[in-house]
Amino acid sequence: MALRLIQRIWRGFQPGTSSCRQSKRVSSFQPQVQVTGEMVEALREVVGSANVSTAMAVREQHGKDESMHRCRPPDAVVWPQNVEQVSKLAEICYRHSVPMIPFGTGTGLEGGVGAIKGGICFNLTHMDRILDLNVEDFHVTVEPGVTRKALNSYLRDSGLWFPVDPGAPASLCGMAATSASGTNAVRYGTMRENVINLEVVLPDGRILNTAGKDRRFRYCIRKTSAGYNLTSLFVGSEGTLGIITKAALRLYGTPESIVSAVCAFPSVQAAVDSTVEILQCSIPIARIEFLDEVMVDACNKFSSLQYAVLPTLFLEFHGSDQNVEEQVQQTEEITQMNGGSKFSWAKDQETRNKLWMARHNAWYAALGLRPGSKGYATDVCVPISKLPEIMVETKKDLVKSQLTGPIAGHVGDGNFHCIMVLNPDDLEEVHRVKEFTERLARRALALHGTCTGEHGIGVGKRKLLEEEIGEVGMEVMWQLKATLDPKNLMNPGKVL
Amino acid sequence: MALRLIQRIWRGFQPGTSSCRQSKRVSSFQPQVQVTGEMVEALREVVGSANVSTAMAVREQHGKDESMHRCRPPDAVVWPQNVEQVSKLAEICYRHSVPMIPFGTGTGLEGGVGAIKGGICFNLTHMDRILDLNVEDFHVTVEPGVTRKALNSYLRDSGLWFPVDPGAPASLCGMAATSASGTNAVRYGTMRENVINLEVVLPDGRILNTAGKDRRFRYCIRKTSAGYNLTSLFVGSEGTLGIITKAALRLYGTPESIVSAVCAFPSVQAAVDSTVEILQCSIPIARIEFLDEVMVDACNKFSSLQYAVLPTLFLEFHGSDQNVEEQVQQTEEITQMNGGSKFSWAKDQETRNKLWMARHNAWYAALGLRPGSKGYATDVCVPISKLPEIMVETKKDLVKSQLTGPIAGHVGDGNFHCIMVLNPDDLEEVHRVKEFTERLARRALALHGTCTGEHGIGVGKRKLLEEEIGEVGMEVMWQLKATLDPKNLMNPGKVL
């Protein structure tokens, strides 16, 4: 099957016809979906009138995330209270061939919640219970309204924690949908490694437990060879295959000792070389975050810090007292060989919190460089060995393109972001940013990397995905989409 | 879609019709596939006459693995030399609607290589190159003929190693297909966590790279959010979705220090309780293997050892000298609290090798308990907290059922095997073993576990898979199979 053919069939398909096969016969233009009064009434019957809104202000709140992608409001917003309601709502949408868009906290960065073809937004924040904490087996189950911050507050006295931390106060099921990661991934992995089981409502309303029957949320197993790995198929599917309504997550023992440190370097190359060497020595570092001098300057200003305005690593070590000491010593040897400064320490919790709060606020600190501006974060990820090359080239490109794009990155994973700060009304600048970000993504692809390490494809990177995955890979992704979502109703226009 | 309907359609389908849809119209009986002389000639044109065999002795060698499942010889065996040949052979099979069965080392334990519907066996052992070792980024690419032992020999001087170790001298791509794991999984994960990219020949001959275009074997990235996770879909698919022809694997730095130890316990419960506590203390133990007293006795006899005939743990610690010492101390505190013996040490490589060789030979040691017998290994895996309960009950059941089934297990993962030793000609005993293994699997399911932790579903556990996954999960698995293998040619009769 030729990729172009399947794409043409698919993209030509418009909700309102009953299967993608029919689209061959329908004309290429179809009117936008009309969500009828009768359908809204049916939604109200499921969740109650108070939990359905068609008010423009509400729809606009749900048509965009934190990115620059323009607002695409849904036709209506519903707030289901439980999975049975999500299932019934999906059945109604399926019957009427109306798109469904899952919505968590709206903290995505790739326009993933925009209702490109109209439809119903499923706001899942009312489903916010933390279920089945299992301290003996190290896991917990959460509903889609639970954020990572809420979970870690809940876990505070249990001796356990959930490490995946993208910075934003995202919902955990949203993080699963995006295959998010963040500052701790270098040691603890991303959502891909830490989601054990998902409950997913399929487009036609069927309720799927990806790792077996529903009891498997209460107790989870560490490994299995039983059939196809459905959990991994839904992690990172960005709402295009189904609506995640429950996630079982792997937890970790709270480290006995946590120590953070800051180290400044004479050059980007020196900082990145140190990162590569630390990993090559198998030091089990928990966080290793890079900030270029522009980013350090912005963070100093935004978070009232006084770090040297130089390329810098923020580091964190987890382990027993003795083990942390050993890690710190090995790491400091490496950084000093590369001309790094003496470590500036953050040992007590308050100082550590201040440090990581500053890192998490990098986005706002960058925007603060130009009041009134908007931001867009690039998200390339390359093999660690290619990191020095791409970062040095990208810094040069920023200067040449006369753009403001402070760099912050999870360099331990080979992943970094240029936070592009721009005036959205200056079309010439918008164009330059677009060209720069595409050039950066293609530079990553040429170095065997990906256009997205953790933000997802969303609406803007679909062309890049094709370049990255190649024809056969794209065909297989289209085949999977077509079989699980035959009417193309799940978050249409995203990923593929 | 009702599961029964899709199953009926599917199982009714017989190679020779051109799509599963047609099967609704064909009668329920179809002759076995006939591989014609013309087709064999076409295969010979691709790989040369020397690399095609229809000799009965050869076909019989390829019709079974190490399990008790009966030999189901293919109609012919082919030895492709490279992926292009695999692709061309698949095209021929697809055109003739003839089943394809991938074959690595034949060390599987669930009858996965039997040619239930006849067809062509793809023996992949001639493709045995180790490609693209990337020491900087910690990965390597292997062809399907490379075994884990060959890889680790190759890596010996690189400072790196590949930890997944199922005991058998299995091929790495076969291990990927089965989602194998073994003794090191408790620390390093299973094949699911350690396969980065796969090259797969799809049933129609298309060549897929699951993580992006082909350059992505030379350099690999640590994480990505780009599209659906195709790699995970093929890991554990047991040859039912395509033929794995290349795998990029994650490597690890060789630990500075490795120490093994043996500890005997007064009871199964005490050994298993110790395991649970070691994990709950987050000690990063590399191996924690349980042997019951029957198994220890068998290993003593088979491998000339003198361990106390008691429930026993074989342990291994990896890390820096200092870190290993800390792990050992913490672990010994726990085992002694549970009445464990003093550690018997294996510090130098020779003693360690002897210890683990004995563990890896457990299968043969068990068979040695009754000369002339055959073996079948159960493979349940349960949440760690449920391990004491299921092991104690299973021991009682063995006694009550008057069966010989020494236990060895990767208890750090909640996974253990009863190696059932039986006389295959004693039909009454065979029946008792079958009843015992099904009772054990259902006991695991009732405790929220799986019927297979690492051996796969193969041909014998399909009914158990249905009980484990539930109706909607099975429907989704069938949908995936139907879309990627519409003619049901890839290793038919396995998994689903």
Image (spheres, coloured by chain):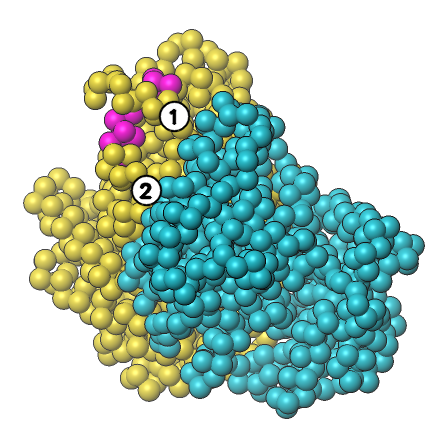
Chain colours: A cyan, B yellow
In which quadrant of the rendered view does residue B28 lie?
Answer: top left
Q: Is residue A200 magenta?
A: no
**Which residue in the structure is indicated by mark 2?**
B475
Quick check: A205 above or below A132? above
The quadrant in which the N terminus of chain B is found is top left
Mark 2 secondary-structure assignment: helix
Residue A317 position in % (x across, y down): 63, 78
Q: Which mark is residue B487?
A: 1
Q: CA distance from mark 1 to mark 2?
A: 17 Å
Residue found at x 78% / y 84%: A305
The answer to which of A439 and B229 lies nearer the viewer is A439
Q: Residue at x 59, y 56 (%)?
A: A63
The amino acid marked with disc number 1 is Lys
B78 shown above or below A265: above
Nearer the N terminus, badge 1 or badge 2?
A: 2
From what the image shows, is residue B424 above or below residue B420?
A: above
Which residue: 32% across, 20% down? B22
x, y (%) of residue A373? 79, 65
- Circle 1 Cα neighbour tier, 10 Å, few/some/many (<14 / 14–19 / ≥20): many
